[in-house]
Image (tube, rainbow, N blue to C red):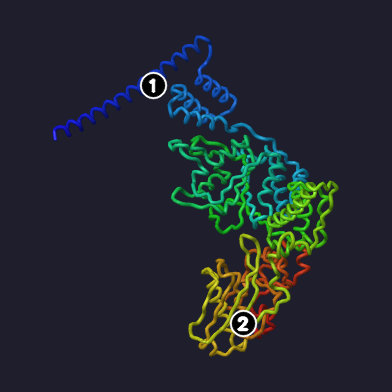
Amino acid sequence: FLLAHIGRELEKIEVSRQIRSKAVSHIEQSQREFFLREQLKTIQRELGEEDERQVEIRLFQQKMAAANLPEEAKAEAERELNRLAKLPIAAAEYSVVRSYLEWLIGLPWGKTTLDNLDLYHARRVLDEAHHGLEEIKERIIEYLAVRRLRQQRSRYQSGENGRFSHGSILCLSGPPGVGKTSLGQSIAKAMDRKFARIALGGMRDEAEIRGHRRTYIGALPGRIIQALRQTDSKNPVIMLDEIDKLGNDFRGDPASALLELLDPEQNNAFRDHYLDVPFDLSDVLFIATANYLDPIPGPLRDRLEILPLAGYTEREKISIAQTHLLPRQLRENGLRPSEIKFTDGVMSQLILSYTQEAGVRELDRTIGRICRKVATAVAHNLENGQLSPQTTQIAVADLPTYLGPAKHQPETLNRAQPPGIATGLAWTSMGGTLIFVEATKMPGHKGLIITGQLGDVMKESVQAALSYIRSQATALGISPDFFNNHDLHIHVPAGAIPKDGPSAGITIAVALASLLTGRPVPSDLGMTGEITLRGQVMPIGGLKEKVLAAHRFGLKTVLFPQRNEPELVQIPSDILQQLTLVPADNMGQVLEVALGVELGG
């Protein structure tokens, strides 16, 4: 026992000796480094050289003098610079203070670019980069014209403080691929301003906008301040891309942080958490983009001027493909214009059978796939010694060879629909599209069955449509006992896709009336509109996108609410000439067109 106890004590003594030895060695090493560093400083002073810290402080002082800092920012910079002068270079806080000073002094406090407000130049830039979009271009020209007038007449229209209110923030809203982001770049180019894009999709942390406080390790300013430093300009065009995709969680709500940022009355003193000094953002031109407006919070949406961008027509897509997409794909794939030729009808077939989108993004990728296959063939020919280039003709019959079978088949043309099916028009973040409402009946006493992942609003539309049809049972020739002995099933494919909204009300009512009267609905007829219990057809949103979708999918007739009739002026005239648009104020008019049924008042 005594030997064991002595052994343990000896182990403790040995561990203590090793710890003491390492501590003494570390202290000696630190003292040696300190001594050598002091010797180095002494030698540098004798030689008339400055040490690293003095050089950095002198550079910061020079940058401060040239940065045109406002009073508060200048006072903060001087205080932090004094702290930096007292800190040893090896201190952990030294790099934190130096990083802060780099951000504070590196911002464009007084740097601006001179605006080009030449309206003819702006129109030319917009027309060169974008086909169509006349309403959007006119609004942008109006914006620039107002800025030009205000600059010229500043003596009469400036406020008491000599500053202008820069008006509302433009928000480009529309489906993917219609040119929202590139339109923002064109606005910057037209005004000769620098451009920065901030992707807001999936952003959940408020600190991404306002910055992190310096107490956190690795803190940085927010994305707005970073964009200003990136552009090195106080008045760039900053695009807030996908503003409808903002999220929120326990770290804060970025949408709420944008409220101050986008308010022209408040953003002249935006205070980033990292910098903790005000920065004037009133000269920045903010442009937001969104696919869908509903997710944007009300207070934030109230600060935005919405400029809707609808999908392109087939004629516009063909023009865009020939003017912009095909030349760009030829350049990117190393092809000469003489080496590939698209015959008549190919672009139209690509649009109808391989893309069917509101924008042109998928069309661009599809043209790129064809160009890559042609480029591969040209490269093989060069390897085999064939130096004279040959022209590859791309015909409609060749498309399956290059792209495989057609992805989209017209579902509504030349297809007889049985009773109980009606075609509706819907509006999604991807643009306009078709929905098919199916109704069937069977003996039973369960009442109404609804499937297809319908939202609460759409389920209520089904109930309203059924109640209306039951109230008109006699006029439609339906037995009063039918509803007591039969179940009705409403289904809206595709079952995996959630659907909601009131605009399918008349489509559901027509499908039920078709089922119960045995009359089929024409396959080339589409419709949209909200229904009331009294059979009134209420107005809906997105009429232009829905009519363009009807044309894109080959429909011939469109039923729509009469109260939406003034919106027809937004639809291209060539589309109006190819469709029969029938306004309806009540379900009697709808059923007469869809089924040939007269309700008699």
* First along the sequence among labels 1 and 2: 1
- Image-quadrant location for residue 477: bottom right
Query: Is residue 526 shown left or right of residue 102?
Result: right
Q: Nearer the viewer, residue 525 or 588?
A: 525
**Furthest residue toward left:** 2
Closest to the observer: 143 or 245?
Answer: 245
Relative to 527, residue 224 above or below: above
Does residue 438 sit above or below 215 in this rendering? below
Quarter occupied by residue 28: top left
Q: In the figure, 263 relative to 133: above or below?
A: above
Write down the residue under mark 1.
30
Q: Which mark is residue 94?
A: none
SS type, badge 1: helix
Classed neighbour count for the residue bearing mark 1: other residues with Cα under 10 Å, few (<14), some (14–19), many (≥20):
few
Three-letter amino acid code at disc 2?
A: Ala
Q: Secondary structure at mark 2?
A: helix
Disc number for residue 513: 2
The image quadrant where one finds the C terminus is bottom right
Residue 366 placed where, x, y %? 71, 57
**Mark 1 vs 2: CB contact within 8 A:** no
Task: Residue 458 in the image: state x and y as whole percent.
Answer: 55, 70
Visible residue check, residue 590: yes
